[in-house]
Amino acid sequence: MGRILEINGPLVKLELPETVLGEQVRVGRLGLIGEVIGRDGNTALAQLYEDTAGLRPGEVAEGLGWPLSVELGPGLLGAIFDGVQRPLQAVREQSGDRMARGVAVPSLPRDKRWRFVPDANRHAGGALAGGDVLGTVRETESILHRILTPPLMHGELLELAPEGDYTIEEAIGRVRLADGSIEKLRLFHRWPVRTPRPFKRRDHAVAPLITGQRILDTFYPLLKGGKAAIPGPFGAGKTMLQQQIARWCNAEIVIYVGCGERGNELTDVLEFMPELKDPHTGRPLMERTLLVANTSNMPVVAREASIYVGITLAEYFRDQGLDVVMVADSTSRWAEALREVAGRLGQMPVEEGYPAYLGSRLAAFYERAGRVETLAGAHGSVTLIGAVSPPGGDFSEPVTSHTKEIIQTFWALSKELADARHYPSVDWLESFSGYVGSAAKWWAENVDPNWESARAEALDLLSASEELQRIVNLVGVEALSSEQRWTLEAASLIKEGLLQQSATDEIDSFASPEKQYALLAAMLEIFRQGMKLVKLGAPARRLIQMPVLAQARRWKSQHTSDDIAALKTKIAAIPGEFDKLMLEYEQTA
Amino acid sequence: MKNIEFRTATSAQGGLLVMGGVPGVAAGSRVQVRDHAGRLRSGLVIRCADDAVLVEVFEGTDQLDLERTWVRFLDEPFKLPVSRDILGRIFNGAGLPRDGRPPIISGDRRDVNGEPLNPAARAYPREFIQTGISAIDGMNSLTRGQKLPIFSGGGLPHNRVAAQIVRQAKLLGEESSEFVIVFAAFGASHADARFFQESFAESGVLNKVAMFLNLADEPVIERLLTPRAALTAAEYLAFDLDYHVLVVMTDMTAYAEALREVAVLRGDVPARKGYPGYLYSDLAEIYERAGRIKNRRGSITMIPVLSMPSDDITHPIPDLTGYITEGQIVLGRELANQNVYPPVTVLPSLSRLMKDGVGKNFTREDHPHVASQLFASYAKALEVRGLAAIIGAEELGDADRRYLEFANAFERRFIGQGEDEDRSVYETLNLAWDLLSMLPRDALIRVSEAELAKYHKGVTA
């Protein structure tokens, strides 16, 4: 038993010999929980996950003997946890609408019984290795929860319970370990959040993550198991874009970490998710979703922990052979929490007050993404999407610039586009994806062999129009040749008819890869047909008035992803529209 | 402990007092300091160990000595007595009366720091508030429980806009406002404070206002307490007494500067422009106290006023605020110079909660599309205006000239309105269609064809 020596904001100096760095401590009469971050002689320095007001020097403190860990087992899905995995719904039932301190509520419900079905291939007497599947629990209609052997456990399975209903604390089996001791197996186990969960080997990421957002899937694809960042100044639509991804992406599990963000945004997710259907299974979205919420007004140390809690949960589902997407909103707030604690520790600041280890911590965090072969031989992936909130929208600041070096897909949001209400405001010139080659294979096999060249053509058109726009801004549109004007118009068609996508429009909100490609092909077809005419001498002014241009801008919200046939009919009619004009100019030519 | 006065000060400097040898002092507890002349000051324990306790003195450490300074540790955080009687009263930044009337007597005293709301307990704001200002209602609407700051600059009429919102804000279908108002001024001038006082008096709502004033010439450290005291009152009115509370706070920049001043004294590591790294968390503690709670009737809607230093929206204060609040109303100097009131620069303005509070079932089915179309058309019109400035308006094509006219009409007629003009949201939307009708139908792709047929007044081409 130790005692408090000094209190300085969230940092508490304790007299607590023999404690281990990283160990959890319980401090004061309120029983506040924290983590040891330093030792000096007989004293230990701890950062607390809760507000320290009211603590006094001299009050008791004790080490708990384990590092910050999460509970992994049935009961995770559909829940909302705080930054140290306290279940917020249960906390509310116990302590009311406000976050009381020192509340001890187990992360997973203890009294709920789950139907456990043992794996048919597991028999008493067989060898058992870490990560092996013991059996399954149907946690929600859409997700079959595989009960895993704790990763570091190896031995002989002595006994496995028959099918039946068990709470997570009841034994469902016994194992004899290598040293001869016998351990019980339960439906859940614990894992320390700052240690990546082990796997057999890393695999190549092969399939794109389909988000249904055209600018993302078609232009800057992300693979399952990949790493992406969404930087953007405030008001650029970062939150909306992340919610769209969480809502529509074709992952099996979505983990949304609200790290230092707005309370109402999480409420929004909590309220709308249960009403929405998973587009891939037709089940309520909440069944595949898990929220970790440490809002901006909650204690800063727990904010630092929250993204590790999130990624550990993601790895756990990956180890069950599932494709998981984790959205971290926002990594900047996490970095700021790091900075705040570093500042109180008196560590030497480098850039903008951030500690020198910012870059290495960020890199280590993003490295926990990936597609892997699990210990049990299955394939699972964690796709990591980190939002970045650069101060003043300046992408050269430390968090954005470090992140940019680490990730493969960069969805840069632009304030200018957002101001003109061009959503999603992903800037097609600043963004990049290192996965285009791999994605191209998938699109060629599954959608259309011409995907890669069509994508490149559209991007060329967009960048050409950027050049032309600069000229227009100087001397006016009249100074352009007809070809140039038509290029400008076609680029604007692509922006409005393809890139712009309304999250609130029922039809436009999600576009299947087939619809995305059909629209892309349609816009390019219009461009090529028009260009043919322009080369024959038709003035662009005339072409721009063609009704098909205004119509094509509306197609995205007129045809659902199931209704591609009707869209294709319209596309097939495009040449006909231009042929009428063609007659005129062929005669004069 | 509460009754013992310690005389163990070991150092005093720049608002901070170090006390030696006072064991067992609670972190964050309030202290009372008595100086050699017998004057009382108040302060807060910000760091404590057995051998030294660091105290922040709100009134500053001027004229303190070490030998004749007595300190009493009150063993509790700063608390505000709350009761229904706070309405109609004026307090200082620490919650003591400054209107010459007796203090509030109540057994119910609340910690001004509040406790963070459990995210699972929040209810999402959805009720549209009509402010009667077109630029807000039409394009950046406010909902009950939202925090929507006004980003402004020196010399711009942010106070008049805030006062107009307070006067006119009501739910659709209501005759008059059923809000009570909590007004907090920190670092504000006497003139500003008087302006609001008079504005409340004129509209006859003085008995529905609780004011917390810490003016520009009053102690800086007390500024850190002012918004917290005001919000404690607001939380009590909203969640204990079921009132809908409108909180107006001015000026957040003065608050952040006070925070920086104190942080520098404490020796905190600076992040950007000398502001401490925890500025974001600290602002969030204030802003996030707005909102609604499940199963409670009341709500807190917050309109903080913030003057952007040198009109720079990327300055840390507006920047961090924008990341926390649910949008922002930006006032612009250019419009103000052209005598447009309210000078709302709509493009950088935003309401994040608008998507869930307007449209069918809330205002009118075309509202979201009309707003989006106005944004797009006005953005395009500004491009044209930029071009016209270079090549001359005469050189513009016919279509572009229409945009130019649209931009002018939009600024004069839609954004511009009288300070007492209270437009209903339907008037605002109809006005929007009048203006959109100046543009060709084909250019309006954000509105549906059905809406065009129903509302567009112009010729087809």
Image (cartoon, coloured by chain):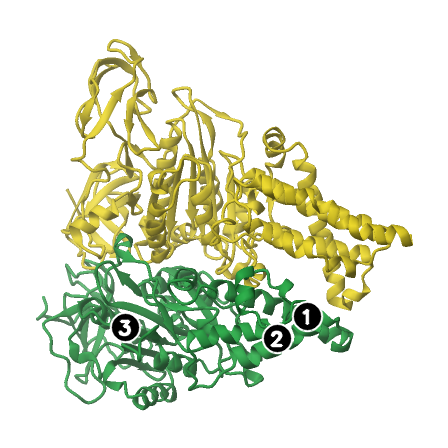
Chain colours: A yellow, B green
Q: Which residue is mark 2?
A: B407
Residue B273 image point, x, y percent: 48, 66
Label total for image: 3
Q: Residues within 10 Å of mark 3 (few under 14, many from 20)?
A: many
Q: Residues within 10 Å of mark 1 (few under 14, many from 20)?
A: many
What residue is at 35 percent from the left and 36 percent from the top?
A313
What residue is at 78 percent from the left and 68 percent from the top?
A475
Which-is-in-front pick, marks 2 and 3?
2
Amino acid at the residue labelled 2: Ala
Residue sitting at the far right:
A589
**Is residue A441 visible to us here?**
yes
Q: Looking at the image, is mark 1 or mark 3 earlier in the sequence? A: 3
Residue A477 image point, x, y percent: 76, 65
> Mark 1 near mark 2, Cβ–Cβ under 8 Å?
yes
Q: Going by the image, does A292 lie left or right of A411?
A: left
Q: Quadrant of residue A452?
A: top right
Using the image, name the chain to which the residue with label 3 belongs.
Answer: B
What residue is at 42 percent from the left and 46 percent from the top?
A328
Amino acid at the residue labelled 3: Val
Residue sitting at the far top:
A125
Using the numbered discs, state the Cα–Cα distance from disc 1 to disc 2 in whole angstroms: 9 Å
Q: Looking at the image, is mark 2 or mark 3 earlier in the sequence? A: 3
Residue A461 image point, x, y percent: 72, 49
* SS assignment at label 1: helix
Q: Which residue is mark 1?
A: B384
Q: Which residue is mark 3?
A: B245
Query: Does label 2 lie on the same chain as label 1?
Result: yes
Using the image, name the chain to which the residue with label 2 belongs.
Answer: B
Using the image, name the chain to which the residue with label 1 belongs.
Answer: B
